[in-house]
Image (cartoon, rainbow, N blue to C red):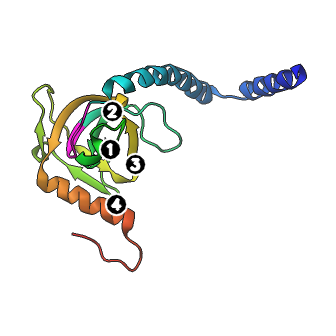
Amino acid sequence: MLSEAVYRLNDRFNFMMEMNEKDQKRAEEIVEFSSKLIELSVKERIFKNLNPKQGEIWTVSFGANAGSEINRTRPALVIQSNKYTEGALTVVVVPITRTTARNDYYVEFTENDVIRAESYNDAPSGTLALDQIRCISKARLGQKVADLNPNKLEEVRSAFFNHLFLNESSETVK
């Protein structure tokens, strides 16, 4: 039994010796995020009764990414139905990025498309990355930033539907 543990430790050590500076930085980020996961688990119990509404924009701590996933703390749009948010531990959101729209499943919006929350200083703007939809723990939510206006929310719904459910022979929803 001990020899297996020593073998695994040696294997990990050899792997660590091959890491470059970028890999080491990434490992440090993951270790830091691990401690945040413990904090999130405690917060989840506290935030169970928090009920963000569809169309609201909240700051979200996405944490470390894998590959091209969106990471760090950034605003995100709640797209989950209000019916399924109440009492749930999780909520479905779409991250907001500063990247310009690359295709039909990126929806841009400006400060004119939102109603800023009183407790937040700046009205958000950016691009909703519908290909980055996430189901997150409510413990990842920070503060409410704004509400997306109903017309823009309808545009997001159409783009989202097209992104998820269209096939080659389907027609787009407008």
Amino acid type at mark 1: Val
Q: Earlier in the sequence, mark 4 or mark 1?
A: 1
Q: Earlier in the sequence, mark 1 or mark 3?
A: 1
Which numbered disc, 4 or 1, marks the residue closer to the eye?
Answer: 1
CA–CA distance in space, label 4 to label 2:
24 Å
On-image quarter of the N terminus: top right
Amino acid type at mark 4: Asn
Residue pictured at 74% horizontal, 24% vertical: 17
Residue pictured at 41% horizontal, 73% vertical: 167
* Residue occupied by mark 4: 103
What percent of the width, then of the height, locates residue 26?
56, 28
Tell whether position 84 is magenta. Answer: no
Q: Regarding mark 4 in the picture, which secondary structure is present there?
A: loop
Amino acid type at mark 3: Gln
Residue pictured at 27% horizontal, 43% vertical: 78
Range of the magenta residues?
50-57
Cβ atoms at labels 4 and 3 below 8 Å apart: no
* Residue occupied by mark 2: 60
Q: Is residue 17 visible?
A: yes
Q: Extreme bottom residue here?
A: 169
* Residue occupied by mark 3: 132
* Residue occupied by mark 1: 93
